């Protein structure tokens, strides 16, 4: 198991990504064709920046990636990235301004996770709060037909959340990346084809 974890850790270092989590997004992008040149992407819980970097590579110089996290990062981003240290749900002027400037987005990505307490029920409840808030934000800034990727920890409310996503997206996929640690309770829901939102 340790060798398995080390493989992705070492690979991330070799490929100049700040964290192994990049391979989760790569797997989902390969499966669902999420990111394309010229897109506008919003990355929630972006630090240390692996998803933001990969998204920037995929959308290219004509695209835009807006990343936001409570934590700072030392990662150097290309010109098409706007990174903000801010609270996604109580945003200050800078991040709010970026939302207004670049919305609607083609895709909203959320790799957010709560600070864990060790109490399974508390951690699941905190996770659910984050995914509900992420969906609310996506609902306000996704383009019609856009996509949504959200990390969730399996628990009693996960199915209800999936059904909620099905009200807003034409298709909802459940995905457990090979690069996720096998002992992790995390899965990803991929909402394809947002039913609301603005036209381009």
Image (tube, helix red, strand yellow):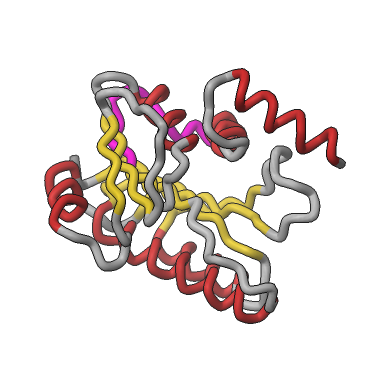
Residue positioned 56% across, 78% down in the render: 125
* Residue 81 image offset from top left, x and y in percent: 29, 32
Q: Is residue 38 above or below residue 43?
A: above
7 with respect to 39 (left or right): right
Question: In this orientation, which residue lies closer to the viewer: 101 or 167?
Answer: 101
Quarter of the rendering occupied by the C terminus: top left
Task: Please identify the quarter of the rendering in which residue 87 is found.
Answer: bottom left
Q: Is residue 125 above or below residue 174?
A: below
Dominant secondary-structure state across the stretch colored magenta: loop
Question: In this orientation, which residue lies closer to the viewer: 108 or 54?
Answer: 54
Task: Decide whether residue 75 is among the magenta residues.
Answer: no
Task: Decide whether residue 38 is among the magenta residues.
Answer: yes
* Residue 140 image offset from top left, x and y in percent: 25, 60
Residue positioned 25% across, 24% down in the render: 79
Residue positioned 57% across, 36% down in the render: 19
Residue range (magenta): 32-41
* Residue 146 image offset from top left, x and y in percent: 35, 45
Q: Is residue 178 above or below residue 190?
A: above
Residue positioned 41% across, 24% down in the render: 58
């Amino acid at each position: 198991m340790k060798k398995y974890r080390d493989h992705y850790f070492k690979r991330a270092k070799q490929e100049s990504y700040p964290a192994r989590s990049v391979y989760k997004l790569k797997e989902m992008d390969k499966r669902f064709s999420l990111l394309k040149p010229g897109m506008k992407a919003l990355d929630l819980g972006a630090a240390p920046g692996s998803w933001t970097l990969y998204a920037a590579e995929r959308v290219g110089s004509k695209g835009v990636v807006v990343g936001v996290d409570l934590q700072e990062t030392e990662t150097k981003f290309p010109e098409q990235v706007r990174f903000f240290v801010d609270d996604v749900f109580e945003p200050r002027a800078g991040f709010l301004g970026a939302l207004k400037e670049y919305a609607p987005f083609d895709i909203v990505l959320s790799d957010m996770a709560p600070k864990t307490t060790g109490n399974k029920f508390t951690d699941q409840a905190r996770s659910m709060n984050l995914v509900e808030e992420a969906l609310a934000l996506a609902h306000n800034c996704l383009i019609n037909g856009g996509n949504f990727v959200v990390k969730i920890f399996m628990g009693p409310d996960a199915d209800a959340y999936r059904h909620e996503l099905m009200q807003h997206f034409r298709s909802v996929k459940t995905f457990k990346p090979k690069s996720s640690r096998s002992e992790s309770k995390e899965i990803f829901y991929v909402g394809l084809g947002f039913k609301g939102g603005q036209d381009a």
